[in-house]
């Protein structure tokens, strides 16, 4: 299984081109589109989402994740093995939170194939490597250190993603002791699920992937609160 997480969106041709390359290189391997709405260019924000949304994947899955504003530049293209699973993508911090949760077993710098488009490593570098790994084959690569980002916090008290319902996923874990937060000048209380709050009333809860998420029952929390990506929040208790 190859699992894709990118900031490519679904309206443009990029995801389709990646699928074509994977179908050519690994026609018998299942490809799952998990998350193509990672915040554009936002590597640090995406690192928390990649970690949270990959924790439930089967151990044999190969994760190909791409948020890569420096594509074609000096950053390395890597295949990281952590916790028994391979993560293929740019060495720009996107896998930092994965590496904190799981033991890093190896890091390989991928060779850039001749003719690869400098602006589309997702199709021409990461997809062939992910296809090889998913079939038990070694990619064309060499061992190298994994670049760490120690200044990034283990949790990030910001809005990382807003879905089409208007729910806002944050970079905070929903620890049981967290009962009240402040965001956009409003204090919000915790609920177990949507129907535990009055209709149209913003609240927060632990989403299905362990992150603190802001929502409103039968309404858009982002619309009610005027939330935008990267908005900060404060844990009160």
Image (spheres, grey):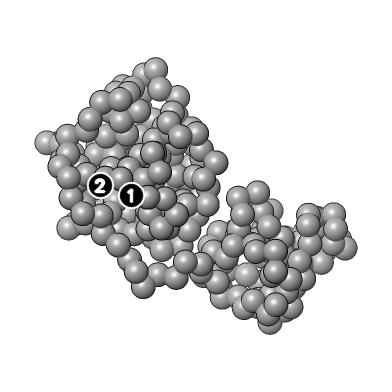
Q: Are marks 1 and 2 in contact (CB under 8 Å)?
A: yes
Depicted 97 relative to depicted 81: above or below: below
Most extreme residue toward the top is: 28
Displayed quadrant of residue 123: top left
Dot 2 corresponds to which residue?
107
Q: Mark 1, residues whose alpha carbon is within 10 Å: few (<14), some, or many (≥20)?
A: some
Disc tally is 2
Point out residue 79 in the picture as x, y percentages from the top left corner: 28, 42
Q: Is residue 196 left or right of residue 108?
A: right
Front residue (pair 101, 230): 101
* Residue 110, above or below 198: above
**Residue visible at 32% across and 54% down?**
68
Q: Is residue 127 above or below residue 26?
A: below
Residue found at the very far right of the displayed protein: 198
Query: Measuring 65% from the left and 49% from the top, which residue is drawn there?
Result: 208
The C terminus lies in which quarter of the figure? bottom right
* Corner quadrant of residue 1: top left
From the image, tell me which residue sits under label 1. Answer: 104
* Residue 40 can be seen, yes or no: no
In the image, what residue occupies the spot 70% across and 64% down?
A: 176
- Mark yes or no: residue 53 visible: yes
């Amino acid at each position: 299984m190859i699992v894709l997480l990118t900031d490519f969106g679904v309206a443009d041709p990029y995801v389709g081109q990646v699928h074509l390359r994977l179908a050519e290189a690994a026609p018998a391997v299942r490809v799952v589109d998990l998350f193509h709405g990672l915040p554009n260019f936002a590597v640090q924000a995406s690192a928390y989402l990649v970690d949270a949304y990959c924790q439930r994947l089967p151990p044999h899955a190969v994760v190909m994740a791409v948020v890569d504003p420096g594509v074609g530049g000096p950053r390395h293209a890597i295949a990281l093995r952590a916790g028994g699973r391979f993560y293929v993508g740019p060495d720009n911090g996107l896998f930092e939170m994965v590496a904190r949760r799981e033991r890093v077993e190896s890091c390989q710098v991928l060779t850039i194939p001749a003719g690869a488009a400098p602006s589309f490593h997702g199709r021409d570098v990461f997809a062939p490597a992910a296809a090889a790994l998913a079939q038990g084959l070694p990619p064309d690569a060499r061992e190298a250190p994994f670049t760490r980002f120690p200044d990034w916090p283990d949790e990030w008290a910001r809005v990382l993603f807003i879905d089409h319902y208007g729910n806002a996923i944050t970079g905070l874990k929903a620890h049981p002791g967290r009962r009240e937060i402040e965001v956009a000048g409003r204090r919000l209380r915790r609920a177990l699920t949507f129907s535990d709050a009055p209709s149209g009333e913003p609240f927060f809860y632990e989403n299905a992937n362990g992150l603190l998420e802001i929502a409103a029952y039968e309404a858009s929390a982002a619309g009610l609160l005027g939330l935008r990506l990267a908005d900060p929040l404060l844990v009160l208790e």
